[in-house]
Image (cartoon, coloured by chain):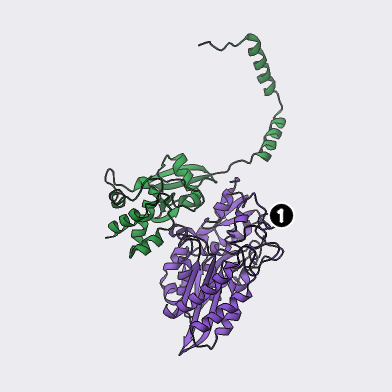
Amino acid sequence: MKPFDLLRPSSIAKAISAKQSQVQFLAGGTNLVDLMKKHIATPDALLDVTPILSSQITGSTETLLIGAAVKNSSAAMDKLVLSSYPLIAKAILAGASPQIRNMASTAGNLLQRTRCPYFYDTTLPCNKRNPGEGCGMREGESRMGAIIGHSEHCVAVHPSDLCIALAALDAEVLYTIAGEKKPMVIPFKDFHRLPGDAPEKDNNLPQNALITGVRIPKNPFSKNYAYVKLRDRDSYAFALVSVAAALHLQGDRIVEARLASGGVAHKPWRWYQAENFLKGKIPSAEVFAEAAALAADETNPLVGNAFKKLMLKGAIEVALQNCLTA
Amino acid sequence: MEQPKISRRFFVSISAMAGAFAFIPASVKSAYISAKNLFIPQKRALPLSVSINKKLYKLQQDTRTTLLDLLREELQLTGSKKGCDHGQCGACTVHVDGERVLSCLTLAAMVQGKEVTTIEGLANGDELHPMQKAFVECDGFQCGYCTPGQIMSAVACVKEGHTGSVEEIKEFMSGNLCRCGAYNGIVKSIQQVAQ
């Protein structure tokens, strides 16, 4: 690791005023420390923000607020999360290992970098690591790459499971920035970005802003939900394709559906077309298959990952079926 | 054995060089040091106080030191193992404030004021922890390299109550890899302690 200073700001305001481009916030460290060991992240200083950020989960009848420092395992065990927002717990438990979930924070989960092997291997070209160097995966080993929303500059995928559930539930990211007293808000669908011609930017968080929490609006999806994650081994692996699904059923019809995927794009991907198609339908295997086909048809796989299209179709069908038996 | 010979000429020339060095102006020396610092970054130290296996340590640590390196290299607590050093194998699992974490991805500075328990702190004197006994009885290991991490994780797994079924145990032990494949013995050990 490159030598760095470790600072412990005593308030959020002090943390923000000390933040610069070569200074990074440190929370759980599960991703950042690893990137520093590999000299992919080379900050001059770290600001340990865990003690000054909220580690509380609070809820009213209208929303759930998860503090930025809440550990993944605490969120997955929380009574309110389990009773009213169980999709969140389901997604968290599909990710990482118990040890890492005990360390990783909510805000850190949103900010984790891609697990694209070309990003991690410093001997290979990567536009995300070294802008302008070229994308190694695009014409290389693209098995783990994106199948939608990719650009000629980057085909990396977003690695989080929690974020897929947050995208499906229309969450919001709360943050603070220098000179603003009020907490600022970004809708979750606009938080992460597509690579375009600037893949080094993962999200639209303003520079030097500090995430303070994630807010999830009250929703009717606490009964019929599912999280399906397909990967190279049964546990403790990143997704090839994952699907968060939620249905709001009334009588024999679907009032509203939510479908989001991980492992397919540079950001958590919502399948709006399939969601709209499901609205008002009577759930059946045929309807689910048709919705899944709508989503799969939107994709544009790379040379080495055409299998993901079929995998996605199957995963959506299974997830929707699992919603009925959840 | 022949004694090394120091000739008079050698002694005089070395003394002269040392003398000359002392007369180099301080400004030249400081310029040299700052030039050196340009290429070799200085390490930054941080005071750290932490309780490890119920013993309080007050240390001065390079900010880059991970908890794993602190345990192994500074405190000679070599029970926790460095398998991958990237959070992929679980061999470095320890407890911080009673919860299992990966010491390789934890900076030592992050455990300031906390309670760390390692495999060395599990037994009560000569009396093994029930999980250590179970691993011995159920063949929970072969080569033993992943075992300290497996045991620390297994103790937490039982405490968390994730022992309802073989599948649940396997899922909640998935962060600890065993290349020998002693998984059946590990699951059996956990079932034995959970009962």
The answer to whether residue A271 is visible is no
Q: Which residue is mark 1?
A: A133
In this view of the protein, can residue A77 be seen by the observer? yes
Viewer-closest of A8 and B195: B195
Q: Which chain is purple?
A: A
Near-viewer residue (A324 or A70): A324
Secondary structure of the residue carrying tag 1 is loop
Q: Residue furthest bottom?
A: A251
Instruction: Write down the chain letter for disc 1.
Output: A
Q: Colour of chain B?
A: green
Image coordinates of residue B71 in percent, x first then y, are 44, 44
* Neighbourhood count class around disc 1 (C-alpha, 10 Å): few under 14, some 14–19, many 20 upward: few
Q: Quadrant of the C terminus of chain A?
A: bottom left
Residue A146: image quadrant is bottom right
Position in image of residue B158 (x %, y %): 33, 59
> Does residue B55 appear left or right of residue A67 in this picture?
left
What residue type is disc 1 on?
Answer: Glu
Residue drawn at point x = 49 percent, y = 53 percent: B87
Residue A239, x across and y down, in percent: 53, 64
